[in-house]
Image: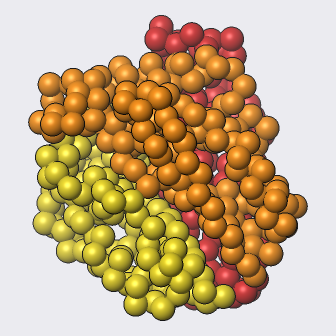
Chain colours: A yellow, B orange, C red
């Protein structure tokens, strides 16, 4: 049994879903392992991970519209406003989505379904440098 | 250290929580491994995984009532309507629940709590064939 | 490759986020392993796990305010009321957060980001004894 580790860095420019699927697929393939478990872990609390449909871009637009309606920037409910009107909403959005995702490796490939993409969901409007730790164990 | 892989297929007939606990427990037991990590990964973006109370059926009814109120079918917020009024709500429900779940294996058993069941949550009304990849590593 | 298992027990006294980061960091360090995968699994359906900002306490206050607004105790939507007005909301809160979290182990340390804390989120008002199974595989 072997392990591999990697880091994906995404330079974000505003609130959006950033597709990191190609990098994950390529890294998994290059590992040379056949069967295993890939784990993604984002080291932030105002950006998150999400597996979502990667075919129709409208899905990403609607996903954002939903979260924006559920947790509007500047929501008067929040007292943690020192980092800006989008910071506490970003923490809530992160709580409602994923900080970590694991994907099995089967026959040398990340076992994503046909329509699944892996996204880094940036919830802040300011540019950021987001780090995702990638771990794999397998053989 | 060894690995096992498996696939669970659920033929769904409408929006509902489908209990897959017995199959997971039986598969884990049959593996012959004693200590490890079981990972479930659903290969879809309009059906998801959820660990929930498996005792009182009313909990499942209420869970569905909650999601239905939060993200009603045909919500005018959404522009991705080409696959039907329940498709975009299904993607949002998936985002808010789980695409992947890992459960430790202890003393040869999936370490679920007494009241925990593992459910496949079908979010579409149309019948579907849903696939869950199961991976285990341990010894 | 080796495995370690552990159990964290939290005696809760009401609905709140309980910081379990120090115990996880200490246990990971004491394992003697350098690279691996740590998995936390909570064996309950009315308490959950959440990675969140651990710096400003107001973030925890606001997180609770958000969930309380989204799923108020005694919500007339719910029929599962036999265990009290906060029980079904607790199940929904659990569904919307995490039952399981995995964190890579890198250079002998749990690879949490600078502002990330790991919390057990108790959703019931009554005192409880909550168990989190901890599993690690690595070398």
- Residue B94 place in picture, x, y as percent: 39, 43
Q: Residue at x 79, y 38 (%)?
A: B114
Q: Percent from the top left, x then y, of residue C86?
A: 59, 20
Residue at 28 percent of width and 52 percent of height: A53
Q: Determine whether, in the image, residue A40 is placed left or right of residue A48.
A: right
Quadrant in the picture for residue A119 = bottom left
Left or right: residue B25 versus residue A42 is right
Q: Position of residue B26 (x, y in %)?
A: 78, 50
- Residue at point 52%, 74% (across, down): A106
Picture quarter containing residue C135?
bottom right
Q: Quadrant of residue C71?
A: top left
> Is C126 left or right of C86, judged from the image as shown?
right
- Residue nearer the viewer, B29 or C92: B29
Which residue lies at the image location 57% right of the left edge and 77% below the top edge?
A: A36
User: As displayed, is residue A64 above or below residue B85?
Assistant: below
Give the total of numbered labels.
0
- If the image is split into quadrants, where does the C terminus of chain A sit? bottom right
| Viewer-nearest residue: C137 or B10 | B10
Residue A107 visible in the current orientation? yes
Front-lying residue, C114 or B62: B62
State whether residue C20 appears in this view: no
> Quick check: B10 left or right of C116?
right
Give the quarter of the figure containing the N terminus of chain A: bottom right
């Amino acid at each position: 049994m072997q392990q591999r580790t990697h880091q994906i860095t995404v330079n974000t420019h505003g609130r959006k879903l950033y597709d990191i699927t190609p990098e994950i697929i390529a890294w998994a393939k290059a590992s040379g392992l056949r069967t295993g478990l890939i784990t993604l872990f984002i080291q932030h609390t105002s950006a998150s991970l999400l597996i979502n449909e990667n075919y129709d871009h409208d899905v990403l637009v609607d996903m954002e519209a939903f979260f924006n309606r559920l947790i509007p920037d500047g929501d008067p409910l929040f007292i943690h406003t020192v980092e800006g009107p989008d910071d506490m909403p970003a923490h809530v959005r992160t709580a409602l989505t994923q900080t970590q995702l694991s994907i099995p490796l089967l026959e040398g490939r990340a076992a994503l379904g046909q329509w699944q993409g892996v996204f880094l969901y940036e919830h802040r409007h300011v540019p950021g440098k987001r780090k995702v730790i990638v771990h794999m164990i397998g053989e």
